Image (cartoon, grey):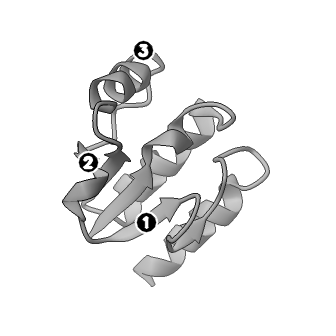
Amino acid sequence: MNLIIEASLSEPPSSISCFRDVTLFAKSFVFNDILLECQKGTRSNYWHWLKNHGAHDFISELVLSEEKESGFKIASRNANINVDKIYYDNVSFIVSSINKIKQ
């Protein structure tokens, strides 16, 4: 199963270390692939952002939102987990929600 994360959740106001923690946990314990969902024309910008901040390790692929990939989704709206940022105050909620999937 895929975990799809809205690309804007990897940049401020999100914490890059919290973003990396979520992807580490998700890839290690629950999901086969982690997809970062980008808008057209932003894929290379997000790849460079993640790579420069050491948060690309667990991302399997960057996909366009038009590609309509299936899976569990973390996004600002219309998702399984709706959050406006991945930060210290909600990272445990996100990880525990992901953990419930494997049970």
Q: Can residue 96 be seen in this view?
A: yes
Whether 97 is drawn above or below 3: the answer is below
* Residue type marked 1: Lys
Residue at 25 percent across and 61 percent down: it is: 32
Disc 1 to disc 2, C-alpha distance: 14 Å
Going from the N terminus, do you reach mark 3 or mark 2 first? 3
* Residue type marked 2: Leu
Q: Are marks 3 and 2 in contact (CB under 8 Å)?
A: no
Furthest residue toward right: 89
Q: Position of residue 101 (x, y in %)?
A: 45, 79
Whether 27 is drawn above or below 71: the answer is above
Q: In this rendering, which labeled residue sits more in front, label 3 or label 2?
A: 2
Whether 103 is drawn above or below 27: the answer is below
Going from the N terminus, do you reach mark 3 or mark 1 first? 3
Q: How many marks?
A: 3
Q: Quadrant of residue 103?
A: bottom left
Residue on which disc 3 sits: 52
> Which quadrant: the N terminus?
bottom left
Q: Do the residues labelled 3 and 1 touch (CB within 8 Å)?
A: no
Badge 2 crowding class, 10 Å Cα cut-off, few under 14, some 14 to 19, many 20 or more, is some
Label 3 element class: helix
Label drawn at residue 64: 2
Badge 3 crowding class, 10 Å Cα cut-off, few under 14, some 14 to 19, many 20 or more, is few
Residue on which disc 1 sits: 73
Residue at 56 percent across and 32 percent down: it is: 11
Residue at 39 percent across and 71 percent down: it is: 72
Q: In this rendering, which labeled residue sits more in front, label 3 or label 1?
A: 1
Q: Is residue 38 left or right of residue 67?
A: right
